[in-house]
Image (cartoon, coloured by chain):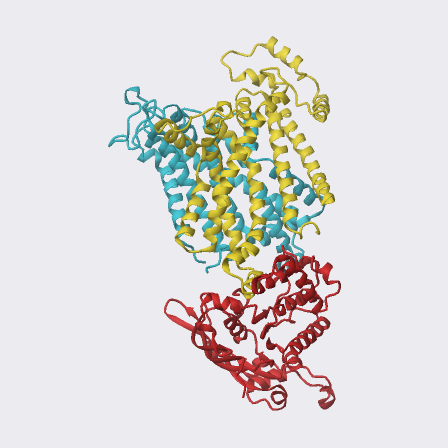
Chain colours: A red, B yellow, C cyan
């Protein structure tokens, strides 16, 4: 058996609550991603999927802190890595795409330059060479007129194009792992499909593994081979995508699936009701009793 | 860019017209003629003959509308009238003193930028640190400081006690004479700049694209150089511009304190002796200057931020 | 609502100024104007004259206590005038819109184009020096920001459910403005007024220092500095204490205003790391 590319072992993460207490955000999460595999993490906002990805990137900001566990990338524990080493991996071997294509790019800098930074940072290219490579990268993500588009500022582009720029940037150095945190949530449905296909194809062609984070099981199903379901800081279920859809074991997963509108389901019962998750998990408040900061705030404002 | 520039200039024009109008109204509609008030605060009773002569000379006994017409046509020819006191054209008086005022405000602003911006920047990069706390205490104190009193203290310490610098005057424009007034005038904008720079940089640091930059594997220094600096600059430029404009207003007191021969002290002296044409002209020039600076700031702003031109 | 250290420091300083101003008549050891005694001129601070004496032998401490009355009056009255003008114009402009809105906007832009001290100076030049003039000049100077805030708050409040409900119920415009809109924007207006008090006190001091504000022999902190300036080498204390009084009272207003703003609007507070 090959060594997993990413091996997260019993990862625990908390935020301080008052002066002495700690509020756990991740309560011992473990999963593995094989080289070239696309792995999906699904769960509602606040379930801990985004903080997991930020922990892998080493981008957790105070007061969030890892309180236990390991994140092994190619057998190397990222949590024990010196900052300088971590920076060398970040962007280069592990890259990330964020949810908000509107704000994730610097508004005062051309997109070409922002992609070019990758080559300057990790491949020691000159700015001139890097800008040329950036145009090439834009072409690779099928942006039309890449040499003209490279001179554009983010505000001159549509949301879909901006997300392509993000993808071009993330894949610029041919990383081994791409973390995509809700990359299509903010996009129109039609654009969503295009961007998803792009990520799928490019990563498959390069053998890049993907950690795909979404609250949308439908999106996850279209791109991932395996899925982990997160709920309230725990990985409650993990399975092959097909198997998960066919026989969900955890009641939360069943809830998620029930909340998913499905084509053709109408014919079975005349009209199928979409199930509300809150009605299934009634003791939800017990699980997250000590909510000092709402999870949404944590995800929204803490990079 | 050219179209944007023209549009901004056109937007300012009506304001200038209204301000000119307002100034005329303020100084004309009030009861009592200028000539009377010119001598009213004097020790002797105003001589009716003298008043009549003055009214005749400056056309003050003409109907309001006619005076207004003269005011407007004169303005169109950049004629701001004649001083009651010296009988010199107001334009000449202002011209003689504009240089000193410009010199003082530029020096004050440079001082404020050179000190205020770095402090604000560093404070924002280390929030909660000693430097941050000190900067913020300094900033709020600077904003509460009566600058002329601060100038008085500086004058006392550095000129009168230590004898390092001249206590007042223009001294043929030597740098030594400039230091005290410029530092005094620069204190308030310095405090404000430190504060806005800090707030601006903190805002930028919390932006999503900074997280993106970190995710690229950039070092802290590069993130600051490549992404924070330019974005923070937008706010800094705006503040600098606004401050630069109002500096000339603040300069009135400082120029008087240090006997600096600028248009501020010209204004104060003219107000004291009620030399209305000079007061009107000086205020108009100060407002114009303020508007020019604001427009210039908008243009610089547009040059830095590609989003502005599009609107 | 949590009020921080800054707020309480500001409140303390402000309370001190109010205390000094209100009680000056009873706690001041001398008369601010009449107790001039050239035999006692330019005395350094001692047990009798806590802050020393000025060039005419008047007790600086006494004059500072009385000076607080001027500063307080100027600060409060000018900001009341400012707020009334700003709120009236801003609220009606935002509520009615149309040509009135355009007019108010134009006026605000013009006012913002004139540096406030210059405007006050111009008004003083026309109506002459003295306390009433000061109140008018400073009351007319700084309303543009209040007006802008009132206008934008009104615009956003206008679209709120309860205001629209009041409209459907047939309430009159003025009634809606005063009962539904005004109470909901008191917070920011109060903050502006508090911060405005600081700048009004500074402007008063500057104008009086220039000899255009409060006229001697009445004790204003600004005019005390004019006198003290001539004698700064002989009696530096006469310049030190009035300035310190201006500084601390303005600092008080500013801290109070900042503290209020932070507690009213958590977004304005810089996020903790």
Q: Is residue A50 above or below residue B239?
A: below
Q: Is residue B269 above or below residue A215?
A: above
Residue A161: image quadrant is bottom right
The quarter of the image holding the N terminus of chain C is: bottom left
Estimate the x, y position of residue B92 in percent, counting from the top left. 62, 21
Q: Please indicate, yes or no, whether residue C232 appears anywhere in the rendered image.
A: yes
| Left or right: B155 in relation to A121 | left
Q: Which sits in the foreground, B257 or C7?
A: B257
Q: Which sits in the foreground, C232 or A80?
A: A80
Residue C165: image quadrant is bottom right
Residue A171: image quadrant is bottom right
Estimate the x, y position of residue A172 in percent, counting from the top left. 63, 68
Q: Which sits in the foreground, B230 or C35?
A: B230
Q: Which sits in the foreground, B263 or B219?
A: B219
| Left or right: C111 in relation to B126 | right
Q: How many marks on residues?
A: 0
Q: Is residue C256 above or below residue A81?
A: above
Estimate the x, y position of residue C160 in percent, counting from the top left. 63, 59
List the single residue furthest toward the left.
C47
Query: Which residue lies at the image location 63% right of the left edge and 56% below the top edge?
Result: A109
Estimate the x, y position of residue A253 in percent, counting from the top left. 58, 85
Q: Please indicate, yes or no, whether residue C74 appears anywhere in the rendered image.
A: no
């Amino acid at each position: 058996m090959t060594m997993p590319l990413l091996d997260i072992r019993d990862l625990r993460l908390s935020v301080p609550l008052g002066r002495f207490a700690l509020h756990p955000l991740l309560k011992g999460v473990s999963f593995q991603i094989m080289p070239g595999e696309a792995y999906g993490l699904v769960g509602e906002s606040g379930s801990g999927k985004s903080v997991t990805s930020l922990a892998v990137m080493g981008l957790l900001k105070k007061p969030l802190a890892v309180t236990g566990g390991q994140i092994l990338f190619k057998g190397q524990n990222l949590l024990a890595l010196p900052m300088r080493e971590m920076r060398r991996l970040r962007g280069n071997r592990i890259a990330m795409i964020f949810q908000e294509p509107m704000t994730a790019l610097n508004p005062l800098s051309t997109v070409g330059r922002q992609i070019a930074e990758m080559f300057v940072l990790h491949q020691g290219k000159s700015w001139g060479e890097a800008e040329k490579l950036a145009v090439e990268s834009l072409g690779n993500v099928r942006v039309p007129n890449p040499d003209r588009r490279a001179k554009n500022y983010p505000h001159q582009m549509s949301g879909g194009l901006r997300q392509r720029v993000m993808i071009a940037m993330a894949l610029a150095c041919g990383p081994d792992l791409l973390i995509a945190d809700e990359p299509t949530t903010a996009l129109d449905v039609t654009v969503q499909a295009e961007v998803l296909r792009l990520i799928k194809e490019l990563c498959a062609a390069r053998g890049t593994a993907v950690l795909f984070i979404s609250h949308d099981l439908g999106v996850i199903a279209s791109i991932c081979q395996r899925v982990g379901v997160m709920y309230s800081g725990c990985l409650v279920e993990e399975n092959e995508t097909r198997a998960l859809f066919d026989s969900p074991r955890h009641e939360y997963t069943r809830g998620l699936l029930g909340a998913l509108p499905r084509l053709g389901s109408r014919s079975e019962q005349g009209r199928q009701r979409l199930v509300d998750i809150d009605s299934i998990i009634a003791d939800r408040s017990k699980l997250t009793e000590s909510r000092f900061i709402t999870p949404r705030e944590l995800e929204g404002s803490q990079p | 860019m050219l179209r944007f520039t023209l549009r901004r200039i056109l937007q300012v024009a009506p304001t200038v017209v209204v301000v000119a109008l307002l100034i005329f109204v303020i100084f004309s509609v009030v009861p009592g003629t200028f000539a009377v008030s010119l001598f009213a605060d004097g020790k002797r009773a105003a001589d009716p003959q003298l008043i009549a002569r003055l009214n005749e000379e400056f056309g003050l006994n003409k109907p309001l509308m006619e005076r207004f017409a003269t005011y407007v046509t004169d303005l169109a020819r950049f004629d701001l009238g004649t001083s009651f006191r010296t009988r010199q054209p107001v334009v000449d008086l202002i011209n003689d003193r504009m240089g000193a005022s410009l010199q003082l405000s530029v020096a004050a602003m440079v001082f404020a930028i050179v000190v205020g911006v770095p402090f604000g920047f560093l404070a924002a990069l280390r929030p909660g640190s000693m430097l941050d706390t000190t900067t913020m205490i300094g900033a709020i104190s600077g904003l509460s400081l009566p600058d002329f009193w601060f100038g008085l203290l500086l004058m006392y310490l550095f000129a009168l006690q230590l004898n390092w610098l001249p206590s007042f005057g223009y001294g043929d424009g030597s740098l030594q004479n400039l230091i005290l007034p410029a530092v005094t005038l620069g204190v308030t904008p310095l405090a404000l700049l430190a504060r806005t720079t800090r707030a601006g940089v903190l805002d930028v640091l919390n932006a999503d694209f900074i997280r993106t930059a970190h995710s690229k594997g950039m070092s802290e220094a590069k993130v600051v150089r490549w992404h924070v600096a330019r974005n923070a600059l937008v706010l800094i430029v705006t503040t600098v511009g606004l401050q630069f404009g109002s500096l000339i207003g603040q300069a009135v007191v400082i120029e008087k304190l240090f006997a600096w021969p600028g248009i501020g002290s010209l204004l104060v002296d003219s107000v004291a002796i009620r030399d209305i044409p000079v007061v009107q002209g000086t205020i108009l020039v100060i407002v114009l200057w303020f508007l020019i600076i604001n427009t210039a700031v908008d243009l610089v702003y547009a040059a830095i931020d590609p989003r502005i031109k599009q609107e | 609502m949590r009020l921080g250290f800054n707020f309480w420091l500001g409140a303390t300083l402000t309370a001190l100024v109010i205390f000094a101003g209100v009680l000056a008549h009873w706690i001041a050891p001398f008369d601010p104007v009449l107790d001039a005694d050239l035999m006692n001129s330019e005395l350094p601070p001692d047990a009798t004259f806590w802050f020393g004496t000025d060039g005419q032998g008047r007790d600086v401490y006494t004059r500072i206590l009385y000076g607080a009355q001027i500063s307080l009056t100027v600060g409060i009255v000018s900001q009341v005038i400012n707020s009334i003008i700003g709120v009236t114009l801003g609220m009606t402009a935002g509520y009615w819109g149309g040509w009135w809105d355009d007019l108010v906007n134009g006026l605000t832009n013009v006012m913002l184009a004139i540096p406030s001290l210059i405007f006050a100076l111009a008004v003083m030049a026309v109506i002459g020096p003295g306390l009433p003039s000061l109140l008018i000049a400073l009351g007319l100077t700084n309303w543009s920001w209040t007006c802008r805030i009132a206008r934008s708050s009104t615009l956003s409040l206008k679209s709120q459910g309860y205001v629209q409900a009041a409209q459907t119920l047939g309430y009159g415009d003025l009634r809606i403005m005063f009962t539904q809109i005004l109470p909901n924007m008191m917070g920011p207006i109060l903050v502006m007024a508090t911060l405005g008090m600081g700048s009004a006190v500074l402007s008063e001091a500057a104008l009086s220092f220039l000899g255009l504000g409060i006229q001697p022999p009445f004790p204003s902190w600004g005019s005390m500095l004019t006198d003290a300036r001539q004698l700064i080498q002989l009696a530096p204390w006469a310049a030190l204490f009035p300035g310190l009084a201006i500084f601390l009272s303005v600092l008080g207003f500013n801290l109070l205003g900042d503290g209020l703003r932070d507690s009213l609007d958590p977004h304005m507070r810089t996020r903790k790391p």
